[in-house]
Image (cartoon, helix red, strand yellow):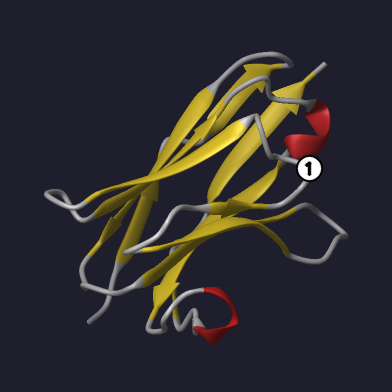
Amino acid sequence: QVQLAESGGGSVQAGGSLRLSCSLSIITNCMGWFRQAPGKERETIGYTYRYGPPTYAAPVKDRFTISFDNAKNTLYLQMNNLKPEDTAMYYCAAGPGYGGPSCKYNYWGQGTQVTVSS
């Protein structure tokens, strides 16, 4: 059974930092982070292809960093200078593909809550 185990969420004040982790039970090429706030649609934070650099959505670019540890098969999301509007449930996802639109995010983590207070 494929598992994506997320951890690292919590509550911080605006300007603070958090690092999310996503341990994957599968080897796959496409990995990404997504979030969903109450009453809003899910949005893409960023994604990475095993053989290329990450791509970020405009609202988080220059504040968030996606990285992948091959040895641990773990995806990370470092979030700096957090803002109240970053409050959401954060999900990691993974699946096959060759980068960009070809990626199919078939597998999802359970989500971890991030709350940023002003």
Left or right: 16, with 41 as reference point: left
Q: Quadrant of the C terminus?
A: top right
Q: Residue 5 is drawn in which quadrant?
A: bottom left
Which of 55 and 42 lies nearest the eye of the viewer? 55
Q: Residue furthest left?
A: 71
**Residue at image coords 39%, 51%:** 6
Residue 75, image x, y percentages? 35, 50
| Other-residue count near label 1 (Cα within 10 Å), few / some / many at <14 / 14–19 / ≥20 | few
- Residue 59's place in the image compared with 92, above or below, is above
Q: Which residue is drawn at 21% across and 68% down?
A: 25
Q: Is residue 17 left or right of residue 71?
A: right
- Element on which disc 1 rests: loop
Residue 89, horizontal then vertical, whole percent: 64, 50
Q: Please provide percent x and percent y for residue 18.
A: 51, 26
Q: Residue at x 32, y 64 (%)?
A: 51
Please provide percent x and percent y for residue 21.
37, 43
| Above or below, 50 relative to 89 | below
- Residue name at image x 45 percent, y 53 percent: 53
The relative height of residue 93 versus residue 2 in the rendered view (above or below) is: above
Comparing 55 with 17, the one in front is 55
Q: Which amino acid does label 1 sit on?
A: Pro
Residue indicated by mark 1: 59
Between 108 and 70, the residue placed more toward the observer is 70
Q: Nearer the viewer, residue 82 or 54?
A: 54
